[in-house]
Image (spheres, helix red, strand yellow):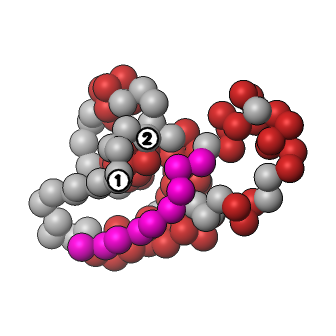
Amino acid sequence: IMNYAFYDHDMDLIAVHYPMDAQRIKKEDYPFTEELAGKIVQDFERLSPGCLELLVHCTMGARRSPAVAIALNEIFVLGNDSDKLKGQYSAYNKYVYRLLKEAGSLTTS
């Protein structure tokens, strides 16, 4: 069992809906970073052999956990249901998803 804690801040949405806030917010205010995304991907790559199930959970289960699950699904080719998951969890956190996908392209290539 791995545990990662980070806030659900989507800088893409903040920039679109709150452009003045996006200008004043510092990156360190958002603890989900490229480094954390890389750690999640590396840890999963290291620990996933023999893993039969993946459970990703967050407080609300609507934005962070779907983003992590969808990204790991795509990075490690865990199944063919990413499009279905993206439709089912359309509010998934695009910021978290994007950083994980970028980390996956660096880690698994």
What residue is disc 1 on? Answer: 58
Q: Is residue 51 positioned above or below 92 on the image?
A: below
Instruction: From the viewer's side, name the closer residue of 109 and 85.
Output: 85
Q: Is residue 28 left or right of residue 4?
A: right
Tell me the chief SS of the magenta region. loop
Dot 2: element: loop
Residue 50 lies, in percent from the top left, at 15, 69
The kind of secondary structure element at disc 1 is: loop
Residue bearing the label numbered 2: 63
Above or below 48: residue 65 = above
Tag 1 and tag 2, C-beta contact below 8 Å: yes
Q: Tell me the crowding category of disc 2: few under 14, some 14 to 19, or many 20 or more residues within 10 angstroms, Cα based.
A: many
Magenta highlight on residue 97: no
Amino acid at the residue labelled 1: Cys
Residue occupying the far top of the picture: 87
- Is residue 46 in view from this perspective? yes
Q: What residue lies at 86% left-to-right and 50% top-to-bottom?
A: 24
Give the vertical position of 72 relative to 21 (above or below).
below
The answer to if 7 sits in the magenta stretch is yes
Q: Quadrant of residue 40?
A: bottom left
Amino acid marked by disc 2: Arg
Front residue of 2 and 8: 8
